[in-house]
Image: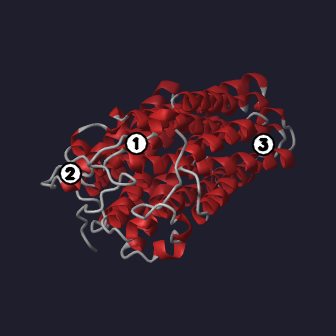
Amino acid sequence: MSDTVDTTAGAPEGTASRRPGYGQLLRTPGAWTFLLPGFAARQPFAMLTIGIVLLVQHTSGSYGDAGMVAAVTGVSMALFAPQNGKLADRFGQRAVLVPGVLLHAVSVAALTVLALAGAPLWALFVAAVPTGASIPQVGPMVRSRWAAVLGASHERSRLLPTAAAFESVTDEFTFVIGPVLATALCTGVHPAAGLAAEGALTLVGGLLFAARRGTQPRPSGRGASKDAAGPGGGYGARVSALSVPGVRVLAVVFLGVGSVFGGMQVSLTAFAEEIGNPGANGLLYGVFAAGNMLAGVACGAIAWRTGPRHRLIIGYLGLTVAASGLWTVHSVPLLAGLGLLVGLFIAPVLISGYTLIETLVPAGARTEAFTWLTGAVALGQAGAVTAAGRLADSHGASAGFVVPLVGTALALATLVALRSRLRPKASGHVEARGMGHRVPVAVD
């Protein structure tokens, strides 16, 4: 019942120590053609929540109202992201991205104008729905491209764990830059500047990413062969990824991660306001995200001797313990140090979760599976910004830090109780790590 050695995809057991590194991963033909525009297109995701909070708090004077608007955006994203992922699996990423980024740019502009005009809260909610629903799911799409490009070759499939770590590092690098950039624009230029930059980056980056058609996974709904649907044949193309029990457990786990992101964003903002130094918010959140990024780099460099399920449980335990002390800290240096520690546990959790998806879900449903996890983070973040905003308004910034503790504790209990569902079922169709190595891939 214990985890086995975490060998690389397609490699014999015991070869983990020879796992290729980042250099070989980045030399994969065609990789840079989707990595660079993908980085620009996913940057806005890290800017949206904090941009909304700063703008609406400025115009309404309430962190609670600001958190509620951000929460509507997050809930909308959580509901629509998996459907966008399912459509991308079936019809191709470009078919979903192009109309999505156009709608997102228009929706962000409408939300910004309404907030500046002092529109009632319900009007902001109305604008927040399409804003969240149209957030481009670039991170899951990049992960699916890695799975398609690397999984098509038995030799390159050994790079899949490295790709998972690299993507986590990239995600967290955006969370180092994004909140700091949005805060700097909102406090130094104009309260609406953060959202304006978010909309512009989404539009330009999303269209450039969509233009790179050669590396996108073959759509399962357009004459794809049975192999193209991934292990299990047509299962991947026709059955929701959420029907896999392990995906549901991971969704709860990622809800808890979202509670950390949301609770930290609002509570750090309120803390910076309380001490009379609003600019400290970007610095503190940047330190938290930097810890996440550094841990992600380390996870990709280490040849792990334990499986991802075991690493997920250990990492989540550490995350819960670290989050439990946030509400007790009242100084910038101590909060920065503890925030760094919390960040160090985030990346191992995310990397382990995404790696497990590769073993649990067939190739034809992986974009949808990744978006369920991304949507779970957004949903957890939405609930957290609402709860933390109300607590910060009523009891001060320290009360808002209780939200990450509660969210991670509940998710940890679920993870421990249902950990057996994260073990892939044996099947003649499923390969060593759940990866199909003969998925047809177009070449740039």
Q: Is label 2 in contact with label 3 (beta carbons under 8 Å)?
A: no
- Disc 2 marks a residue whose amino acid type is Ser
The secondary structure type at the circle numbered 1 is: loop
Amino acid under label 1? Pro
Mark 2–mark 1 distance (CA, rounded to whole Å): 23 Å
Asked if the residue under mark 3 is in contact with the one under mark 1, i.e. CB atoms within 8 Å, the reply is no
Q: Which residue is mark 3?
A: 272
Q: Amino acid at mark 3?
A: Ala
Q: Dot 3 surroundings within 10 Å: few (below 14), some, or many (20 or more)?
A: some
Q: How is the image coloured?
A: secondary structure
Q: Seen in the image, is 203 located left or right of residue 14?
A: left
> Can residue 196 be seen from the camera position used here?
no
Q: Is residue 177 left or right of residue 365?
A: right
Q: Which residue is mark 1?
A: 424
Instruction: Name the quadrant of the C terminus.
Output: bottom left
The residue under the point 50% across, 46% down is 353
Residue for badge 2 = 220
The alpha-carbon separation of the residues under discs 1 and 3 comes to 45 Å
- Asked if residue 265 can be seen in this view, the reply is yes
Please name which of the two marks, 1 or 3, marks the residue nearer to the observer. 1
Which of disc 1 and disc 2 is earlier in sequence? 2
How crowded pointer 2 is (Cα within 10 Å; few <14, some 14-19, many 20+) is rated as many
Please tell me whether mark 2 sits on a helix, a strand or a loop.
Answer: loop
Look at the picture and state if 371 lies above or below 181: above
For the residue pair 249 and 370, the one nearer the viewer reads as 249
Q: Earlier in the sequence, mark 2 or mark 3?
A: 2
Work out whether mark 1 precedes mark 3 in sequence or the reverse, and give the earlier one.
Answer: 3
Q: Which circle, 2 or 3, is nearer the viewer? A: 2
